[in-house]
Image (spheres, rainbow, N blue to C red):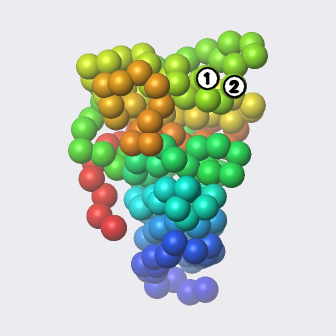
Amino acid sequence: MGTAHISAYGTTTSETLLGNSGNNVLNGRGGHDLLNGGAGNDTLKVTHTFDPAVYGDQSVTLVGGAGTDIFAIGACGKLVGANNTALVSDFQHGVDKILFASGSTPTTLLTLSTPAGATLDDMLNLATSQMSTITTVSQFVFAGDTYLVMDRTTSNGFAGTDTAIKVAGTPLITWSDLAFGLVGV
């Protein structure tokens, strides 16, 4: 696959975008996408999301591979559910960054406990009901995976403009693993 740096963009259909040992930029834009950065210091983006009511189910799996990777994810509240997910499959604490593509910077990372019998919808609503005046990021474990949720509105409850990211397993995630800023397409 070579060592040249790759910049690749998906469409609204389903694609597999594969990087190499270079420092790649891969951007999924809808459909059921797999973005695999390979061995370099890669940036994997999910900055375009489309309404599942119009485009059908969508999911994106981000695999950073070896190296220091950035997982840049914009508002993808509509990508949460059994068939609509944004999944970071191989996050490494202290090595990789999860970048919330946002014009605002939260000041708080809340860790929530998952009550017995809670559903994913219950936890998403709980995560976005913690603060009503500031943007926050909450994390919780559900069904063996970690979820990071950025509340982007002042209303209580999970909305399509909020961001939810599923991180495979239960890796340690601290404030230093997160970044915030606008990300170009």
Residue 119 is labelled as 2
Determine whether 11 is above or below 49 in the image: below
Q: Residue at x 56, y 56 (%)?
A: 52
Residue type marked 2? Thr
Q: Residue furthest front?
A: 53
Please say if 42 is above or below 73: below
Q: Nearer the viewer, residue 37 or 123?
A: 123
- Residue 32 % position (x, y): 63, 65
Q: Secondary structure at mark 2?
A: loop
- Left or right: residue 15 versus residue 106 is right
Q: Which quadrant of the figure has residue 163?
A: top left
The CA span between labels 1 and 2 is 5 Å
Q: Is residue 16 above or below residue 81?
A: below
Q: Residues within 10 Å of mark 1 (few under 14, many from 20)?
A: some
Q: Which residue type does callout 1 highlight?
A: Asp
Where is residue 167 drawn, in percent x and y? Answer: 61, 42
Dot 1 and dot 2 residues touching (CB under 8 Å): yes
Residue 122 is tagged as 1
From the top left corner, tell me how far across and down residue 133 is, in percent: 26, 19
* Camera-side residue of 161 and 185: 161
Q: Say what secondary structure mark 1 lies in.
A: helix
Up the image or down, 29 lies above or below 90; here it is below
- Residue 94, visible in the rendered structure: no
Residue at figure coordinates x 31%, y 58% from the top left:
183
Q: Residue at x 61, y 61 (%)?
A: 56
Q: Is residue 147 left or right of residue 100?
A: right
Q: Position of residue 114 (x, y in %)?
A: 65, 17
